[in-house]
C-alpha cells in the first residue's frame, strides 16, 4: 500500500465537502470570498532524513518548507496568502538555531506574498519535523485541478527538471569530479527549491486545463494528471528542459536521463492546455517548455528524439511503498 492507496482507503471517505475533491488533488477549496475569489489550502510536511539532510543549514530548511507548499498553490493558479506552522523540535537540537529558522521562514513567506498567522510547537525525541498549512487565493474559476486534461491538449512544464535529484546526490558526496560551482548550484537546488514565480499562477489560471506541481518526479506527476483526467500523457524526453548541470550529467556515458525524469524534488509546474492557447503561453514570456501532449488512453508514454518508447525503471517517489 503506497501513500495514495492509504489516502483513498482511510481518509478520502472523510472528505465530504465538494471543495476537498475527494482528496484527489494537492489543494482544497474551502471558501468563496467577496468578489468571487476562492480560498484554497494545502499542507506539506518535511522530515529530517527524508526531505532534508541532518546537516542542512536550518535557514535553508525553513525556505524549503515554505516552497514545497508554495509550489502547490501556484500550480493550482493561486497566490499564497496566510500560513500556519507546526514545529516539532528535537530535544537534543540546539535551540539557538530557532532564531535563524524564524528569520528565514519570515523572509521567505514575505517573498511569496504570505504571512504567518498561527500554528503549534512541541518537542520530540525523534527527528526535526515541520509542517506548514498554506492558504492561497484563486480567481473565480477556482483551483485548476489535475482532472481537466483532454486529448489534443499540449503538455507544458516550467523551469528545469532534475536539479533536485542531482542536488541530493551531490549533497551526499556523489559526482566526485564535479566542479565547485556546479556542485554548489545543485546542492542549493536541493536545499532551496526554486518554484516558478507568481506570474505562472496567472498563466495557469488563464490557460491550463489541468495542472500539478512536480514533486514526486516528472513521470509520476504526469501520471497523476493522466489518471485523474482519464487520458494518456506523452512526454518527449528530448524537449524536457534541463539546466547546464543536468546536461553535464547526461554527457557522462553512464548517466541515465530517466534518473532526472523520476527523481523528484523539482517543484516546478506541469500543466496541460488546449493547443489554441499555445501562442498566448509563448507570448507570456514565462520560462515554460512544450514537452508533449495528451492522447486517448491511459498512463504515461515517454519517447526519445527518434520516437522510440523509453521504459523508466520506476515512475517516481512514493511514501509507504515497498
Image (cartoon, rainbow, N blue to C red):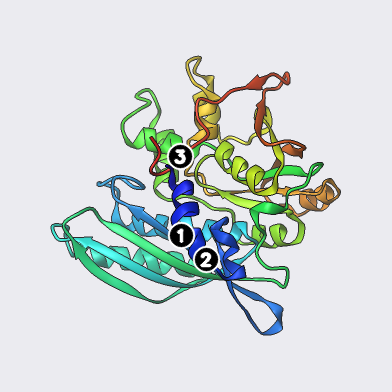
Element under label 2?
A: loop
Q: Is residue 130 left or right of residue 9?
A: left
Could you give the CA–CA distance between mark 1 and mark 2, rounded to whole angstroms?
A: 7 Å
Residue 11, numbered label: 1
Element under label 1?
A: helix
Furthest toward the left, the residue is 92
Residue 317 picture quarter: top left
Q: Residue at x 66, y 30 (%)?
A: 301
Image coordinates of residue 22 in percent, x first then y, are 57, 60
Image coordinates of residue 292 in percent, x first then y, are 72, 36
Residue 182 picture quarter: top left
Q: Residue at x 48, y 65 (%)?
A: 14
| Label 3 sits on residue | 317
Q: Residue at x 72, y 41 (%)?
A: 231
| Position of the C terminus by quadrant | top left
Seen from the viewer's position, the closer of residues 231 and 96 is 231
Furthest toward the bottom, the residue is 34
Choose mark 1 or mark 3, whichever is in front: 1
Q: Is residue 101 left or right of residue 316?
A: left
Disc 1 to disc 2: CB gap under 8 Å: yes
Element under label 3?
A: loop
Mark 1: few, some, or many residues within 10 Å (few <14, many ≥20)? Answer: few
Residue 15, numbered label: 2
Q: Earlier in the sequence, mark 3 or mark 2?
A: 2
Disc 1 to disc 3: CB gap under 8 Å: no
Amino acid at each position: 500500500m503506497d501513500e495514495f492507496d492509504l489516502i483513498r482507503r482511510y481518509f478520502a471517505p472523510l472528505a465530504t465537502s465538494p471543495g476537498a475533491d475527494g482528496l484527489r488533488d494537492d489543494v482544497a477549496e474551502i471558501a468563496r470570498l467577496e468578489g468571487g475569489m476562492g480560498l484554497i489550502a494545502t499542507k506539506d510536511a518535511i522530515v529530517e532524513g527524508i526531505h532534508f539532510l541532518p546537516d542542512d543549514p536550518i535557514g535553508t530548511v525553513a525556505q524549503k518548507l515554505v516552497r514545497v507548499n508554495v509550489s502547490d498553490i501556484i500550480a493550482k493558479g493561486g497566490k499564497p496568502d496566510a500560513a500556519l506552522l507546526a514545529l516539532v523540535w528535537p530535544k537534543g537540537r540546539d535551540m539557538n538555531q530557532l532564531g535563524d529558522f524564524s528569520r528565514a521562514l519570515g523572509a521567505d513567506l514575505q517573498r511569496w506574498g504570505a504571512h504567518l498567522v498561527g500554528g503549534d510547537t512541541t518537542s520530540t525525541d525523534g527527528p526535526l519535523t515541520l509542517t506548514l498549512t498554506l492558504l492561497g487565493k484563486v480567481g473565480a474559476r477556482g483551483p485548476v485541478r489535475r482532472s481537466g486534461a483532454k486529448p489534443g491538449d499540449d503538455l507544458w512544464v516550467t523551469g528545469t527538471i532534475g536539479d533536485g535529484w542531482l542536488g541530493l546526490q551531490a549533497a551526499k558526496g556523489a559526482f566526485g569530479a564535479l566542479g565547485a560551482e556546479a556542485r554548489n548550484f545543485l546542492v542549493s537546488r536541493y536545499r532551496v527549491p526554486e518554484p516558478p514565480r507568481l506570474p505562472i499562477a496567472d498563466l495557469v489560471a488563464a490557460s491550463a486545463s489541468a495542472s500539478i506541481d512536480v514533486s514526486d518526479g516528472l513521470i509520476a506527476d504526469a501520471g497523476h494528471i493522466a489518471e485523474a483526467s482519464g487520458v494518456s500523457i506523452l512526454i518527449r524526453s528530448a524537449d524536457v528542459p534541463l539546466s547546464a548541470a543536468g546536461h553535464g550529467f547526461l554527457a557522462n556515458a553512464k548517466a541515465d536521463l530517466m534518473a532526472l525524469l523520476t527523481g523528484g524534488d523539482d517543484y516546478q509546474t506541469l500543466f496541460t492546455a488546449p493547443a489554441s492557447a499555445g501562442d498566448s503561453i509563448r507570448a507570456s514570456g514565462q520560462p515554460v517548455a512544450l514537452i508533449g501532449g495528451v492522447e486517448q488512453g491511459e498512463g504515461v508514454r515517454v519517447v526519445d528524439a527518434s520516437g522510440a518508447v523509453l521504459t523508466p525503471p520506476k515512475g517516481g517517489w512514493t511514501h509507504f511503498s515497498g
